[in-house]
Image: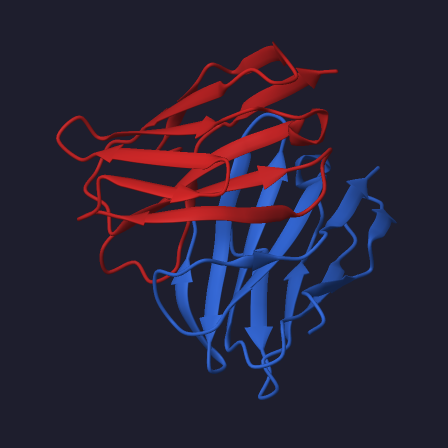
Amino acid sequence: KAGVTQTPRYLIKTRGQQVTLSCSPISGHRSVSWYQQTPGQGLQFLFEYFSETQRNKGNFPGRFSGRQFSNSRSEMNVSTLELGDSALYLCASARGQGASEQFFGPGTRLTVL
Amino acid sequence: SQQGEEDPQALSIQEGENATMNCSYKTSINNLQWYRQNSGRGLVHLILIRSNEREKHSGRLRVTLDTSKKSSSLLITASRAADTASYFCATVIYNQGGKLIFGQGTELSVKP
């Protein structure tokens, strides 16, 4: 079974631009979560989606948004990029909704110049 | 803010030795999970322990959970160079779905 895939793997943008990251969960998994990892703040929860509905949201500004499609694939968008948005963005999928183990993708490394 | 705090922040041992990492958290949990991350890559799930469990084993891994002290420990026995990685505990709080709240991690270095 293929793992969680994320595209692109690396991205360089400039301040003020916007970016869209994509995540394809493991086949059969209906829950997708997003996390941001930085050296200063560590791993922080962004959102959780299940059956195309956002179930949970972390403490991030409205510039961070996401969605989930009917095939469970998810996208995350960051508008008006700031230098501090430079991070590793990780997507994780789980079989169902709720507190179970999550399977992480390799991440998208975003650099904002 | 981070729910969990881990110690030590860094640990260096020789191959064959045991490695113990500790995690403390602040609020009541549904379960606690441990993940491993190699050099800024994706996280790999190691083990999940529920709030009504006290100890769990998986291969060379042993996890304990003390809900009265709000703490957990991860023991890796007979460590190998391939165990070199960062280890994170993550808690799941009741009624917050699958949201993982991570600690800052322990960086483990196993020297051959």
Foreground: B76 or B93? B76
Q: Which tint was used for chain B? A: red
Residue A45 at what x, y percent from top left? 48, 49
Foreground: B26 or A1? A1
Query: Which residue reaches farthest left?
Result: B68
Above or below, B12 against A33 in this view is: above
Residue B79 at what x, y percent from top left? 59, 24
Residue B96 at what x, y percent from top left? 30, 58
Q: Which tint was used for chain A? A: blue
Query: Which residue reaches farthest bottom?
Result: A70
Where the C terminus of chain A falls, by quadrant?
Answer: top right
Above or below, A83 against A29 in this view is: above
Q: Is residue A61 left or right of residue A5?
A: left
Above or below, A19 against A111 in this view is: below
Where the N terminus of chain A falls, by quadrant?
Answer: bottom right
Q: Residue at x 64, y 52 (%)?
A: A90
Colour scheme of the rendered structure: by chain
Query: Residue B22, located in which quarter of the rendered image?
Result: top left
Q: Could one spot residue A60 in this view of the protein?
A: no
Above or below, A90 against A73 in this view is: above
Foreground: B107 or B26? B107
Query: Residue A27, located in which quarter of the rendered image?
Result: bottom right
Q: Could one spot residue B28 in this view of the protein?
A: yes
Q: Residue at x 36, y 35 (%)?
A: B63
Q: Is residue B49 left or right of residue B9?
A: left
